[in-house]
Amino acid sequence: MLGGIGLLAGARYLPHDLIFGGPGFGFWEHYTVYNGFAAIALFAFCLLQIQVGLQERSAALVNLGVAFIALIIIAAYLSLFGSMAVTGAMFVVSGVFLIVFGVYLEKKRRSLMRQIKAPAAEGGQP
């Protein structure tokens, strides 16, 4: 959580000329290296949260991690829609990809939930 807060604080308070390449609050104006770093860091944090949820056998942590991965994907999709920098065909292709990836995430989440509900293997016995 502190890592996410640090990423947001960096985006808001670090010098814009160094990070964003110009004045303004760069998230909506143009894509930057910092935005890419933040997106990758948040995605990695979500994967870590899912792994911790599996280790702790916590359905809430797994669901929260999957939900935030879905939010990251939706944010990327909206950013693509807002920029209109790519052609309509790419927009349609990315939309289809997001729908397919969403179905995959839901199936993966269900299999992870089954793993959590299954009894843990005890000391070397199958």
Image (spheres, grey):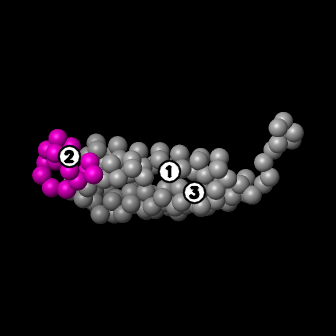
State the residue position of label 2.
14
* Earlier-in-chain disc, 2 versus 1: 2
Q: Position of residue 36 (x, y in %)?
A: 34, 45
Instruction: Classify mark 1: residues with Cα within 10 Å, few (<14), some (14-19) or many (20+).
Output: many
State the residue position of label 3.
61
Query: Helix, strand or loop at disc 3?
Result: helix
Residue 34: tell me if it is visible: yes
* Earlier-in-chain disc, 2 versus 3: 2
Query: Helix, strand or loop at disc 2?
Result: loop
Query: Helix, strand or loop at disc 1?
Result: helix
Three-letter amino acid code at disc 2?
Answer: Leu
Q: Residues in magenta?
A: 9-25
- Return the residue nearer the eye: 107 or 89: 107
Image quarter for residue 113? bottom right
State the residue position of label 1.
46
Instruction: Classify mark 2: residues with Cα within 10 Å, few (<14), some (14-19) or many (20+).
Output: few
Three-letter amino acid code at disc 3?
Answer: Leu
Residues at marks 2 and 1, CA–CA distance in whole angstroms: 24 Å
- Image quadrant containing the C terminus: top right
Does the segment drawn in magenta span residue 20? yes
Does the segment drawn in magenta span residue 21? yes
Q: Position of residue 44 (x, y in %)?
A: 47, 45
Residue 100: tell me if it is visible: no
Residues at marks 1 and 3, CA–CA distance in whole angstroms: 10 Å
Q: Position of residue 85 (x, y in %)?
A: 28, 56
Three-letter amino acid code at disc 1?
Answer: Cys
In the rendered image, the vertical position of residue 123 relative to residue 85, given as above or below: above
